[in-house]
Image: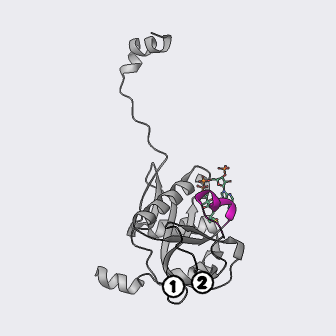
């Protein structure tokens, strides 16, 4: 028996109840009551210019793709991260895909792995739900770690100004973006339709 094992076996502390360590954050589906906290987090993380992005044209008036609005909460149940994905069509009569964004993490919680966890969970969930590809506009230096690149977006376009080298995609089904061309168009449920169905 080594010294550590002996100490554990004989120490009264070894038998005292020990609370299991709480995870720093958990991921879950976004809830209706997260709206205000999420909007405030986005303002803090991205600033006032966030509503002028070309992705916003695709998101405005639409609901996120089914099952693909995720949040991270800290141990006190405070919202510390958010990501949403949106249904899009790739050009007139083109295939369906997803547009990811915004991804944002509470500034005081940055570099704690929350952004990566949200990305990996969102990608896994999108694949599980049968989607073929995820597109986004973002920094290649961040998103390439999840497999995103500009290799298959050269014939595609966002409906507004954006920097082409930041227009990235990840195929969830091999070859899904082969031959894809044209401007992305929102194809998800409209907010009014969603409210009507919910009511
Ligand atoms: C980008 C963001 C979501 C990352 O979330 P996070 O929880 O801090 O990310 P993680 O902890 O998973 O990863 C941190 C790593 O990503 C790197 N990183 C963060 N943003 C980056 C960027 N724009 N470009 C390159 N690397 C970036 C960090 O330097 C860090 O690197 P390290 O692991 O080598 O230390 C978060 O910083 C954020 O909310 N930024 C403001 C909103 C925003 O710009 N969103 C869109 C991103 S294009």
Judge from the rendering whether residue 195 lies leftward or rightward of residue 169; answer left or right: left
x and y percentages locating residue 37 in the rendered image? 48, 65
The kind of secondary structure element at disc 1 is loop
The magenta region covers 139-150
Q: Residue furthest bottom?
A: 92
- Residue depicted at 59% across the width and 60% down the height: 147
- Circle nearer the N terminus (1, 2): 1
The answer for how far apart the CA atoms under marks 1 and 2 are is 8 Å
Q: What is the quadrant of the N terminus in the image?
A: top left
x and y, in percent, of residue 158 in the image = 62, 82
Q: Quadrant of residue 108?
A: bottom right
- Residue that carries the numbered disc 2 in the rendered image: 181
Q: Residue 63's image quarter?
A: bottom left
Q: SS of the residue at dot 2? A: loop
Q: Residue at x 55, y 64 (%)?
A: 41
| The furthest residue to the left | 199
Q: Which mark is residue 190?
A: none
Q: Going 57% across and 59% down the picture, which residue do you hit?
A: 105
Q: Position of residue 154 (x, y in %)?
A: 67, 78
The CB of the residue at mark 1 lies under 8 Å from ligand 1: no
Q: Are marks 1 and 2 in contact (CB under 8 Å)?
A: yes
Point out which mark residue 94 bears: 1
**Does residue 145 belong to the magenta stretch?**
yes
Closer to us: 144 or 179: 179
Q: Is residue 9 magenta?
A: no
């Amino acid at each position: 028996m080594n010294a550590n094992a002996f100490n554990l076996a004989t120490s009264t502390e070894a038998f005292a109840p020990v609370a299991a360590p709480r995870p720093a954050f958990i991921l879950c589906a976004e809830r209706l009551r997260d709206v205000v906290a999420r909007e405030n987090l986005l303002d803090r993380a991205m600033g006032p210019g966030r509503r002028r992005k070309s992705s916003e044209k695709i998101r405005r008036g639409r609901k996120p793709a089914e099952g693909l609005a995720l949040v991270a909460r800290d141990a006190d149940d405070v919202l510390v991260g958010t990501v949403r994905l949106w249904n899009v069509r790739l050009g007139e009569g083109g295939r369906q895909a997803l547009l990811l964004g915004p991804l944002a993490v509470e500034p005081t919680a940055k570099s704690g792995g929350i952004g990566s966890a949200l990305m990996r969970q969102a990608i896994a969930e999108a694949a599980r739900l049968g989607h073929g590809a995820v597109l986004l506009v973002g920094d290649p230096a961040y998103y390439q770690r999840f497999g995103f690149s500009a290799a298959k977006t050269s014939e595609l376009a966002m409906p507004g100004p954006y920097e082409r080298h930041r227009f990235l995609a990840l195929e969830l089904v091999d070859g899904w973006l082969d031959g894809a061309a044209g401007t992305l168009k929102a194809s998800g449920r409209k907010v009014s339709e969603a409210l009507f169905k919910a009511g």
